[in-house]
Image (spheres, rainbow, N blue to C red):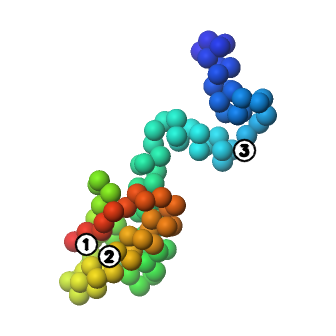
C-alpha cells in the first residue's frame, strides 16, 4: 500500500484530525466502507426475533431468511400461523424499531 493511500485511510479512521477513534466507531466505518450494512441489518432482524416475540412464540417459530425486505418465518402449526399473521404489522414495527432502521417491510409465515 502506498504511503499516501495509507495516510488517507488513517485520516478517514481518525476523522482527519489525527485523534484515535473507538473500536465501535472503527467497526461502523468498516461496515459502511465494505457495503455490508444492509446485510448486517437483515442479520440483526433474524437475531432479534426471539427477544422481540418472546419465548412462547420463539419455541414454535423459526426465522428462515430475508429477501427484499421480507422475513420468512417457519411456524409449527396452522393455528399459530393464523395468530401470527394477525400480528404481522405489529411485529414488523417492533423488529424495525429494535434494529434501528426500516429494513423489514413484511413477514411471511409458512
* Residue 8 visible in rendering: yes
Q: Looking at the picture, tell me which residue is in the foreground, 73 or 100.
A: 100
Residue under pointer 3 = 22
Is there any visible trace of residue 43 in the rendered image? no
Measured along the vertical axis of the image, is residue 17 above or below residue 7?
Answer: below
Confirm or deny contact between disc 2 and disc 1 (CB under 8 A): yes
Residue visible at 45% across and 81% down?
55
Of 1 and 106, which appears nearest the observer? 106
Cα distance in 3D space between marks 2 and 1: 9 Å
Find residue 80 and name its label: none
Residue name at image x 51 percent, y 67 percent: 98
Which residue is disc 1 drawn over? 109
Question: Nearer the observer, disc 2 or disc 1?
Answer: 2
Secondary element at image label 2:
helix
Left-right relation of 99 to 8? left
Q: Position of residue 27 (x, y in %)?
A: 61, 43
Question: Tag 2: Cα neighbours inside 10 Å, few (<14), some, or many (≥20)?
Answer: some
| Label 1 crowd bin: few (<14), some (14–19), many (20+), radius 10 Å | many
Amino acid at each position: 500500500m502506498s504511503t499516501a493511500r495509507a495516510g488517507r485511510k488513517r485520516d478517514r479512521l481518525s476523522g482527519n484530525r489525527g485523534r484515535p477513534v473507538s473500536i465501535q466507531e472503527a467497526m461502523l466505518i468498516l461496515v459502511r466502507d465494505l457495503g455490508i450494512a444492509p446485510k448486517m441489518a437483515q442479520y440483526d432482524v433474524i437475531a432479534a426475533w426471539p427477544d422481540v416475540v418472546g419465548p412462547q412464540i420463539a419455541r414454535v417459530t423459526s426465522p428462515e431468511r430475508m429477501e427484499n425486505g421480507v422475513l420468512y418465518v417457519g411456524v409449527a402449526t396452522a393455528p399459530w400461523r393464523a395468530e401470527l399473521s394477525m400480528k404481522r404489522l405489529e411485529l414488523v414495527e417492533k423488529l424495525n424499531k429494535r434494529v434501528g432502521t426500516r429494513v423489514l417491510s413484511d413477514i411471511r409465515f409458512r
